[in-house]
Amino acid sequence: MDTQPLFLGLDLSTQSLKAIAITSGFQTAAEFSVNFDSDLPAFRTHGGVHRSADGLTVTSPPVMWLAAMDLLLDRMKQAGFPFHRVVALSGSGQQHGSVFLKPGRQERLARLDATRPLADQLKDIFSVSHSPVWMDSSTTAQCRALEQALGGPQAVADLTGSRAFERFTANQIAKIHQTRPADYNNSERITLVSAFAASLFIGDYAPIDVSDGSGMNLMDLRNRCWATPALQATAPGLGDKLSPLCASHAVVGTIHRYFSTRYGFPADCLVIAFSGDNPCSFAGLRLQNPGDVAISLGTSDTLFGALTQPAPSATEGHVFASPIDPNGYMAMIVYKNGSLTREDVRDRCARGSWQEFNAALERTVPGNGGHIGFFFKDPEITPPVLTPGIHRFGPDAKRMTAFPADHEVRAVVEGQMLSMRLHSSHVGIRPCSVLATGGASVNQGILKIMADVFGCAVHTANQPNSAAFGAAYRALHGWTCSTRKRFIPFAEVMRDAPPFAAAITPDPENHALYSRMLPLYEEREKSVLDS
Ligand code: ADP
Ligand code: XUL
């Protein structure tokens, strides 16, 4: 019988709760999941959330997360999952979402009764029964107030790593304090989704790891402690309500006897700090060296990069403390116009076929004969653009209303890649290697332009569930540091992980051409933003 130790990664995301167990040899031993809408219909969520009529307020019931944990662990038990082999676990949670707990509930967590489900015992611990989640955009007034109190958007970014964003926890807490002061006052503890899930496993309030803590507009990014001016500007007495911060590889406790008695975890199973889903994906994609960049070409496009020096921006992106390096940082830039915008061009100009799309790329040359386009099919996050539209510039710098079909195809891909290079440089990213993931990373034509624009090798990783894998890797990392009683670099722990797929190498001439094109692209972008 297999007796290898297992490392468990949980992923409490917006729509589902997943578990992935790996061996120290990086074999995937098991995967399980619970979908909130279909498996827990009593909570009446759509996509895991409830939306207000105006769509601005978006929440999830935290009791649903408890019920999901009960169901997931029960399913694992029924399937004969070898809980007794799990030596460490960690987790990933959707970022920014907050959980508000009534006074005295620490005691309740400590006294869990192994004969009853979690949801049954803990359903009344929440002072706010509907947790704000990252999709909420109802707190613009609170964002402006925070920026005003701290000296403007760049000051907030310099202190916390991001300007004030509606979904960031400070602004959500400020809204609760202003609109429901009694609920705020009745909250002894305010924590993140990730740290809340960790609290269940240790039977105590778990600390917030510095990486997920960076998504709150409340943490001093460089000193990795709560930023007093931000706390004071958010709500009175907040410093006493927040969980303390901890390193992302820290052991936050050993597993509560509830889980060893009910499911068979070993009594000494370590619980490593839980973190946010993007930090966990960053770990799952093993971005361990400065200059390592991952680009996920999914529904939206996301770029992650490892940094040694943070350069937070008031206009684009976020800088978080690294989830794998206590002295490092990760930058993240999100684009709304990703695959759906490429699909729109494919459908209009390449008869709905990726093959035709790539043939059009083959028929055109790098630089696109001077045709540059900005494709905002949807309002864009990076750069911030509210009004959808397509802006085209011809070789003579004149605006054009349409491009020939082949130029349109190349323009959308070149424009997206140049934008990623430009805006990632604004937050301090200097790529040395790029790892492409997500649905469109199967497209060699797109990857070739990516390699030429960034001027570095592009590898591919076909790894769905990178957040859950990242949580399992972080469990292994934290466990290794704890058992060896010193910090071990993440890269050393991941040394034997399977390599990513072979690279596309850049053409130096094409790269030089794109480097010359970048200032022109930036100028055109400015004119689009001003118009
Ligand atoms: P999600 O972000 O929802 O997880 P995925 O990472 O699965 O999305 O990516 C889905 C997208 O991948 C689709 O919208 C599709 O446009 C894109 N895609 C799939 N195959 C190709 C291809 N050959 N070339 C370019 N894009 C592709
Ligand atoms: C990141 C963000 C989302 C959530 C999704 O800033 O808001 O990616 O983390 O779970």
Image (tube, rainbow, N blue to C red):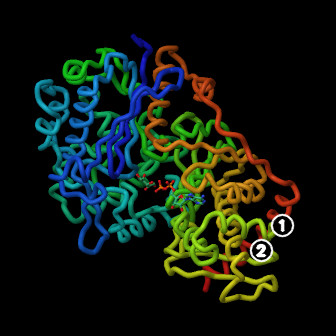
Disc 1 + disc 2, Cβ < 8 Å: yes
Q: Which amino acid does label 2 sit on?
A: Leu
Please say if 339 is above or below 476.
below
Residue 520 in the image, given as x and y percentages of width and height: 77, 74
Residue 99 in the image, given as x and y percentages of width and height: 27, 47
Residue 277 in the image, given as x and y percentages of width and height: 44, 45
> What's the residue at 33%, 51% (across, down)?
15
Q: Which image quarter: residue 404?
A: bottom right
Q: Residues within 10 Å of mark 1 (few under 14, many from 20)?
A: few
Under tag 2, what secondary structure?
A: helix
Q: What residue type is labelled 1?
A: Arg
The residue tagged 2 is: 520
> What's the residue at 48%, 31% (across, down)?
474
In 3D space, how far apart are the residues under numbered discs 1 and 2 (Cα atoms)? 8 Å
Q: Residue 292 carries which label?
A: none
Q: Which image quarter: residue 138?
A: bottom left
Note whether residue 229 is visible. Answer: no
Q: Which mark is residue 516?
A: 1
Residue 77 in the image, given as x and y percentages of width and height: 25, 26
